[in-house]
Amino acid sequence: MNKLNDLPIVPIVIAGVLILAGCGLVGGVAALTLGVFRQTAPVSEPTVSLAEVEPTAQATATALFEPTFTPLPATDTPEATATPEVTEEPTATTEPTSAPAPVQTSAAPPPTDPPAPTATSPPETGPLGQISFSLQRTSIQPGEQVIFNFSVTNITRDTLPFGFLGATVLNAEGANVNFQPSWTEHSLEEDETLTHQDNIKPGVLTEPGTYTVYLTVCYSPADECQVGGEWVFLSGPVELTVIQP
């Protein structure tokens, strides 16, 4: 221990410092040399043969074609042909006929075995009373109309229906020439009076001669009156003359 204490300390320290400095210098030179080597050494690039490289995917170019429209050859447009008009044959139309009130019907048969009334003395019995009947003119030209007026009253205590009420024309032989219905399928209430003016149509009495006209009623329903029924002369005969032209 005493020998070590006797050694000189300063020279040893200096020697250690020099050694460390030398080692540091050597290390720095080595590091610098290695850095220069790394910078100057050529880096060889790997060479790859084109033959060895297989393509991984071969892109196939696809051409995009726009659709082309080929025009069709022009065709001649056919000219429109005139369609023949369909002509319809005119349909015959029936002219409306106004139905008079009351309804006109065909001539009804004259009363069977009528009473023999006089012009001023109508029948005394029957449901219709207070009979009045007259012609506006008692002489006419052939084919003229005959205007007549009448009035009747229901003298019963009930409603009185009847099928026909009008004027009957008989010729000189007593044959029924025409019946002009004024009321059809009608009725009168108790004490009701019916007053009416009518006419025997023009063109009915065309033959010159003497005729008798009666106010006539059928108390049966209208359909029964057409084939018979209860016909009665309400008035006496009124003479009518068709003048010889």
Image (cartoon, rainbow, N blue to C red):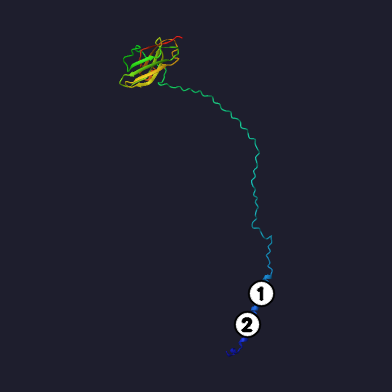
The tag earlier along the polypeptide, 1 or 2, is 2
47 or 152, nearer to the observer: 152
Callout 1–callout 2 Cβ contact below 8 Å:
no
Name the residue at 66% across, 74% down. Answer: 32
What secondary structure is found at the residue carrying circle 1?
A: helix
Query: In the displayed image of the protein, which residue is found farthest to the left?
Result: 157
Amino acid carrying label 1: it is Leu
Q: Position of residue 116 (x, y in %)?
A: 34, 11
Number of marks in the image? Answer: 2
Amino acid carrying label 2: it is Val
Q: Position of residue 30 (x, y in %)?
A: 66, 75
Relative to residue 166, is residue 53 depicted above or below?
Answer: below
* Residue with the mark numbered 1: 32
199 or 84, nearer to the observer: 199
Residue 150: in sight, yes or no? yes
Relative horizontal placement of residue 181, taking residue 91 as reference (left or right)? left
Q: Residues within 10 Å of mark 1 (few under 14, many from 20)?
A: few
Relative to residue 64, is residue 204 depicted above or below?
Answer: above
Q: Position of residue 183 (x, y in %)?
A: 38, 20
* Residue with the mark numbered 2: 17
**Displayed quadrant of residue 121:** top left
60 or 110, nearer to the observer: 110
Q: Position of residue 135 (x, y in %)?
A: 39, 14
Residue 107: in sight, yes or no? no
**Displayed quadrant of residue 25:** bottom right
Number of the label disc, if any, that sits on residue 22: none
